[in-house]
């Protein structure tokens, strides 16, 4: 009897959770739709200047025209490519540096203040220097994307490495394991959730850095489209590029989120 009661309560709880998720999703969509409807009405009735603020219908028309001439695919593709390359390089270099700092406590003591200062430095200030050093090339934009995320990522991963249970580390050494065994058998597996969490943050930061780089050194990409459209007062293009950036950021974050769910599913199975 008690088992049946628990089963019924569990089903009620799961139904309640599902209902809650549906309600939240519906209200999210309704708020977004309401915003676009009010924006369109305000623009059509003259409550706001349609030349400055544009309107959803103009943005959709602009997007469709660029789909027809296929120019939008070039801009989106370039930004996605630069973001993914900078993101992958950040993950690789940050992991490598964090491991080196973990292996050498003396090196970590020496480098820590420099990493903190570099992480605190406004990265937009580096972009003009990168253009002078590397030229107005795609490499400059990728490095700009990396510069926003890499120093904070190194510090975050290094901190995560030091949260490992010290008893497990002692056990490895008791069994005559080496520091490499400790790293591969305890530290890295323990830090995988932190690495994935770091990836969630880094994908957005790399996108921001890439856009900063495209503002200054690009001939294609959404950042270039934004800066060009603002200069020639094509504000429909500008707002369309901003909307596409929001969608792109959500898509990239969803990809990392899916990776996390796959990892958690594999871990629990």
Image (spheres, rainbow, N blue to C red):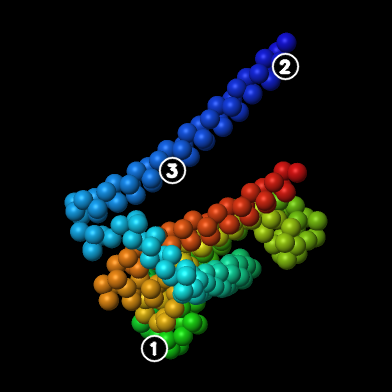
Q: Which class describes the residues within 10 Å of circle 3: few (<14), some (14-19), or many (20+)?
A: few
Q: Residues within 10 Å of mark 1 (few under 14, many from 20)?
A: few
Q: CA distance from mark 2 to mark 3?
A: 39 Å
Query: What percent of the width, then of the height, locates residue 36?
Result: 34, 49
- Residue drawn where x is 53% and y is 66% of the image: 154
Quadrant placement of the C terminus: top right
Where does residue 223 sit, x and y in percent of width and height? 40, 72
Number of labelled discs?
3
Helix, strand or loop for disc 3: helix
Picture disc at residue 132: 1
Q: Quadrant of the N terminus?
A: top right
| Disc 3 target residue | 29
In this view, the mark in front (3 or 1): 3
Q: Label 1 to label 2, Cα distance in Å?
A: 71 Å
Which residue is label 2 attached to? Answer: 3
Whether residue 110 is visible? no
The first of marks 3 and 1 along the sequence is: 3
Mark 1 or mark 2, which has the lower sequence index?
A: 2
Q: Is residue 95 left or right of residue 137?
A: right
Tell me which corner region of the image, top left, top right, bottom left or bottom right, holds residue 239. Answer: bottom left
Local secondary structure at mark 1: helix
From this viewpoint, is residue 258 visible?
yes
Counting from the top left corner in percent of width and height, residue 159 is at: 54, 58
Left or right of residue 45, residue 40 in this image: right
């Amino acid at each position: 009897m008690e088992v049946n009661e628990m089963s019924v309560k569990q089903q009620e709880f799961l139904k309640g959770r599902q209902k809650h998720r549906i309600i939240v999703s519906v209200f999210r969509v309704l708020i977004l739709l309401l915003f676009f409807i009010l924006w369109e009405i305000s623009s059509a009735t003259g409550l706001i200047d349609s030349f400055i603020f544009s309107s959803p219908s103009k943005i959709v028309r602009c997007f469709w025209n660029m789909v027809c001439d296929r120019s939008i695919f070039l801009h989106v593709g370039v930004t996605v490519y630069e973001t993914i390359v900078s993101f992958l390089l950040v993950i690789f270099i940050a992991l490598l540096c964090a491991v080196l700092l973990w292996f050498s406590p003396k090196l970590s003591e020496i480098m820590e203040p420099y990493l903190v200062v570099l992480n605190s430095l406004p990265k937009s200030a580096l972009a003009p220097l990168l253009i002078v050093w590397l030229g107005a090339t795609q490499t400059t934009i990728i490095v700009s994307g990396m510069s926003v995320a890499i120093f904070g990522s190194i510090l975050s991963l290094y901190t995560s490495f030091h949260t490992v249970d010290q008893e497990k580390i002692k056990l490895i050494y008791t069994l005559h394991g080496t520091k490499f065994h400790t790293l591969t058998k305890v530290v890295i597996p323990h830090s995988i959730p932190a690495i994935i969490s770091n990836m969630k943050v880094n994908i957005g930061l790399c996108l921001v850095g890439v856009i900063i780089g495209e503002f200054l050194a690009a001939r294609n990409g959404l950042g270039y489209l934004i800066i060009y459209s603002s200069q020639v007062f094509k504000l429909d293009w500008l707002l369309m590029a901003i909307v596409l950036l929001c969608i792109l950021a959500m898509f990239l974050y969803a990809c990392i989120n899916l990776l996390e769910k796959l990892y958690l599913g594999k871990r629990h199975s």
